[in-house]
């Protein structure tokens, strides 16, 4: 006999429902309907707990304490200041999103091969994705997204152009941002994207960002996520990708910021002959909780994917990697490889790794491996025996371990930036 | 240069006693060979000199240039001029050899209060020493020792030694795994470093290496003690008679 009892709502859950009633968020009727459906889903499911399989290691219901007011849209001058001192690469074509609002006033002339509009200006097509209990990021985003980018990259786009999407939080009070980007890379196009999240330390703001990315026939793209939010931030990110026939995508993700991170990468490998690479670095320190969850669906034959994550957990950090690979029955000749290697550097830190393979085809190569270790004492001794003090020797080995995943990145300038982020994080540890 | 007195040491993990009252003195400029059968404590002695944590010193002392070596950290010993050429140099993936060399040289210079070596000077220095050891610069672009052959690893050790310019070199079975040609190159590298103010301890099983690196003194290590010392002729005697006879004679 089962008696279903409803759990009492948390402060955050109650807050979100009340907030939704009060806010008047942009969008046409279709969008408004989608928003209502999303908030209804939240009312039913609540925030996910450990009992929701996909959130087993990250109890969002316990960890997300509050619903915050949406951050306000800055004027041009405020946005300029917020963006101004963020040293990113000079030669990026930069699209600034400040406090969850796209700021077109700060955009240089848009290259001809791009069609860009603010999400709220466009058609209502931006709302999709499931509203199931395990899709809390999309539920919250659908209900509360204030803005974002709609972008179409046409076939003339040159691979020399890097499109930077700079998410900057600049309020001095805790607030919420929710943005949604829809990006289409047309058949035969090449595009490089660099997405970066930054914000101030010591402020418990919430950042929610969903990107839907479609890669057309024989298109090529690189997507970089550099998450370096403030040290008390909650970052909920979701990248949803659909790969067309012959498409190639390289994803680089580096997490160095935030108190609480859930970073989801969902890829539908939908076109034959397509290839996906994911390389990730997760730096988990202080009392932060960093969860990276990937779901790859190989739905057609003759596709390949490769994922390598390198993680360092230290102090009282808790890290999570969940990697699911689904191979459909017709997806013969799939070649999917996944590796998750972690260094645990303190007694109080932890890391959970959960590789999951669901294979219904019978002629596939699927490899997965997870290792968790401390630094090799013999390696340390060797370096110290050459005069390198222990702390430097440790950092040298940790850097080496992490930077191996960036070796395939044939972009020295970007690689230097990411390495600099790693160095800075390491230098901040004692 | 080095004075070891009545050294007793055991493996920290399981209390196995390895060194049982070892005495050894090495003068500046001296090349001392330590020979002995397997398990006599040769490598343990090398590791203890370099400062490996796996051993516990229960008795005795090691004085290095007037300093109590046992109170110094591993990296401090290196900066003070002690160099251990490893029997099995470690492969360290992800650390480019050049980065490692520069970090090591500059860490030592910093500890000694000297200016760091600037990149152009460093590169010139490495090129010059590498050429003498027939080491291709391309090899040094690879991660440290990764994919190096046995001979390349040993040559890389000697290159490190040449670059770090230590005062006391400890060569732990540097001849193991080397063919004759590589042995000659490595020996020439060591001989080039011989000088009146630099001492070398050569640890080896075989007399062969000592044909190339001719020692000033030879010491036989057995069961954790030096049981016999002599000049280079002792090495030849060992080669002819084997360890068993010498050990029995000494007992």
Image (spheres, helix red, strand yellow):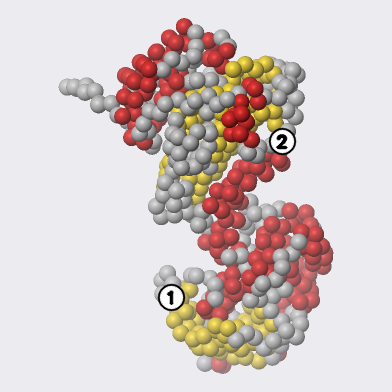
Residue A247 lies, in percent from the top left, at 65, 22
**Rendered view: A140 above or below A341:** above
**Rendered view: A120 above or below B196:** above
Residue A429 lies, in percent from the top left, at 51, 53
Numbered disc 1: what chain? B
Q: Quadrant of the N terminus of chain A?
A: top left
Residue B206, picture quadrant: bottom right
Whole-number angstrom distance, CA of label 2 to CA of label 1:
62 Å
Q: Residue at x 74, y 64 (%)?
A: B117
Task: Report whether B23 appears left or right of A344.
Answer: right
Label 2: how many residues lie within 10 Å, few (<14), some (14-19) or many (20+)?
A: few
Residue B137 in sight here: yes
Label 1: how many residues lie within 10 Å, few (<14), some (14-19) or many (20+)?
A: few
Q: Secondary structure at mark 2?
A: loop
Numbered disc 2: what chain? A
Residue A265 lies, in percent from the top left, at 52, 29
Residue A46, picture quadrant: top left
Q: Seen from this angle, which residue lies furthest left?
A: A1
Residue B245 in sight here: no
Q: Residue at x 39, y 13 (%)?
A: A37
Q: Are both tags, 2 and 1, on one chain?
A: no
Q: Secondary structure at mark 1?
A: loop
Q: Residue at x 61, y 61 (%)?
A: B90
**Disc 1 marks which residue?**
B16
**Disc 2 marks which residue?**
A90
Task: Report whether B224 appears left or right of B220.
Answer: left
């Amino acid at each position: 006999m089962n008696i279903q009892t409803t759990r009492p709502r948390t402060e955050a859950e109650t807050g979100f429902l009340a907030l939704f009633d009060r806010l008047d968020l942009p969008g046409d009727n279709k969008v408004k309907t989608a928003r209502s459906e999303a908030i209804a889903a939240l009312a039913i499911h609540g925030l996910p707990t450990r009992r929701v399989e996909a959130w087993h290691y990250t109890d969002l219901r316990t960890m997300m304490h509050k619903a915050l007011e949406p951050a306000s849209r800055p004027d041009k001058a405020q946005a300029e200041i917020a963006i101004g001192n963020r040293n990113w690469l000079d030669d990026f074509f930069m699209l600034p999103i400040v406090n969850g609002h796209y700021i077109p006033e700060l955009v240089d002339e848009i290259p001809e091969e791009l069609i860009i509009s603010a999400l709220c200006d466009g058609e209502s097509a931006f709302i999709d994705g499931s509203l199931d209990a395990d899709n809390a990021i999309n539920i919250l985003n659908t209900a509360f997204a204030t803005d974002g980018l709609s972008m179409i990259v046409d076939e003339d786009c040159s691979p020399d152009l890097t499109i930077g999407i700079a998410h900057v939080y600049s309020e001095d009070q805790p607030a919420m941002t929710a943005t949604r980007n829809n990006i289409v890379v047309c058949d035969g196009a090449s595009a490089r994207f660099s997405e970066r999240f930054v914000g101030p330390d010591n402020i418990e703001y919430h950042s929610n960002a969903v990107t839907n990315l479609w890669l057309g026939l024989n298109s090529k793209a690189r997507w970089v996520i550099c998450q370096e939010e403030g040290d008390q931030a909650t970052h909920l990110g979701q990248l949803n990708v659909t790969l067309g026939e012959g498409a190639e995508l390289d994803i680089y993700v580096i997490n160095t910021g935030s108190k609480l991170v859930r970073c989801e990468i969902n890829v539908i490998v939908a076109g034959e002959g397509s290839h996906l690479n994911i390389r990730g670095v997760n730096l988990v320190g202080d009392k932060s909780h960093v969860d990276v969850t990937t779901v790859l669906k190989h739905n057609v034959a003759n596709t390949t994917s490769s994922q390598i994550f390198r993680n360092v957990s230290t102090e009282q950090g808790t890290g999570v990697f969940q990697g699911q690979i689904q191979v459909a029955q017709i997806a013969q000749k799939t070649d999917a490889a996944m590796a998750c290697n972690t260094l645990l550097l303190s007694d109080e830190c932890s890391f959970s790794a959960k590789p999951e393979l669901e294979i219904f085809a019978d002629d596939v190569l699927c490899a997965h491996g997870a290792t968790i270790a401390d630094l090799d004492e013999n390696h340390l001794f060797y370096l110290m025996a050459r005069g390198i003090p222990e702390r430097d020797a440790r950092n040298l080995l940790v850097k080496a371990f992490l930077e191996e995943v960036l070796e395939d990145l044939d972009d020295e300038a970007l690689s230097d930036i990411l390495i600099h982020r790693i160095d800075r994080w390491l230098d901040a540890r004692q | 240069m080095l004075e070891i007195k009545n050294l007793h040491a055991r493996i920290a993990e399981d209390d196995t006693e390895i060194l049982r009252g070892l005495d050894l003195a090495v003068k500046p400029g001296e090349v001392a060979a330590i020979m002995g059968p397997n398990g006599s404590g040769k490598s343990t002695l090398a590791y203890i000199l370099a400062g490996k944590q796996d051993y516990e010193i229960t008795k005795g002392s090691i004085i290095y240039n007037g300093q109590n070596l046992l109170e110094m950290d591993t990296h401090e010993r290196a900066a003070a001029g002690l160099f251990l050429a490893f029997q099995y140099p470690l492969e360290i993936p992800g650390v480019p050899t050049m980065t490692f060399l520069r970090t090591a040289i500059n860490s030592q210079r910093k500890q000694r209060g000297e200016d760091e070596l600037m990149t152009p000077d460093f590169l010139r220095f490495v090129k010059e020493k590498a050429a003498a050891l027939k080491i291709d610069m391309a090899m040094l672009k690879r991660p440290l020792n990764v994919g190096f052959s046995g001979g390349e690893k040993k040559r890389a050790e000697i290159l490190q030694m040449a670059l770090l310019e230590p005062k006391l070199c400890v060569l732990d079975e540097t001849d193991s795994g080397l063919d004759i040609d590589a042995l000659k190159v490595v020996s020439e590298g060591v001989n080039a470093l011989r000088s009146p103010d630099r001492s070398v301890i050569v640890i080896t099983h075989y007399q062969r290496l000592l044909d190339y690196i001719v020692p000033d003194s030879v010491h036989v290590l057995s069961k954790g003690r030096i049981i016999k010392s002599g000049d280079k002729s002792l090495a030849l005697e060992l080669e002819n008679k084997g360890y068993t006879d010498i050990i029995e004679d000494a007992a």
